[in-house]
Image (spheres, rainbow, N blue to C red):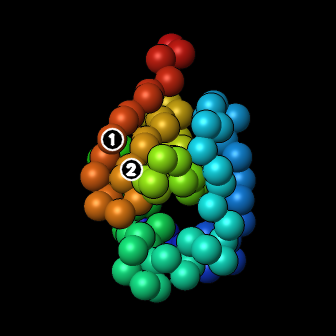
Amino acid sequence: MTERISPVVFALAALVSLPWAVHAGRDVSHDEALRLAEQGELRPLQSIVDAALARYPGRLLEAELEHEDGDYRYEIEIVTKDGRVTELEFDGRTGRLLDVDEDEDD
């Protein structure tokens, strides 16, 4: 079962900085992110979260949208059902999964 994200949560999540991220790009404001999604230039956050949770079932911890070198990147952090923190990076325009970093603490 996936949980729907309200626009308010999206706005807050877009502004939150993930502690593991190196900020070479700039964070995208919630207003800009909503405008880009409405114009079809950016995948909606919900579709990215759904894709992340389909691959790694669990609970959303944080989400961030950054713009770097002309590209938009969603950074999604989830905790899987087995308790692992997993960080996923998606292309903001295509929704393609670019990178996965799983916490290896056992």
User: Residue at left 43%, top 85%?
Assistant: 39
Given contact means CB atoms under 8 Å apart, are the residues at marks 2 and 1 in contact? yes
- Which residue is located at x 70 percent, y 46 percent? 17
**70 versus 99 height, above or below:** below
Residue 63 in picture, x, y percent from top left: 58, 54
**SS of the residue under disc 1:** strand
Is 43 left, or right, of 106 in this rendering? Answer: left
What type is the residue that disc 2 sits on? Phe
Quadrant in which residue 77 is drawn: top right
Which residue occupies the foreground of this view, 25 or 1? 25
- Vertical comparison of 71 with 34: above or below: above
| Residue 57 rendering spot, x and y as whole percentages | 38, 49
Residue 9 percent across, percent down from the top left? 66, 70
Question: In the drawing, what numbered circle is on residue 90?
Answer: 2
- Can residue 81 be spotted in the picture? no
The amino acid type found where label 1 is placed reads Leu
- Position of 14 relative to 24 (above/below): below
Question: How would you rate the neighbour count of disc 2 (Cα within 10 Å): few for under 14, some for 14-19, many for 20 or more?
Answer: many
Please name the residue that numbered disc 1 is placed on: 98
Does 60 sit left or right of 11 as displayed?
left
Q: Nearer the viewer, residue 44 or 81?
A: 44
Could you tell me which residue is drawn at 61 percent across and 79 percent down?
7
Query: What's the distance in space between the residues labelled 2 and 1, CA to CA?
Result: 5 Å
| Residue 79 visible here | yes
As drawn, the residue found furthest toward the top would be 106
Q: Residue furthest front?
A: 69
Q: Residue at x 49, y 76 (%)?
A: 36
Secondary structure beneath dot 2 equals strand
Quadrant of the rendering where the N terminus is positioned: bottom left
The mark that comes first in sequence, 2 or 1, is: 2
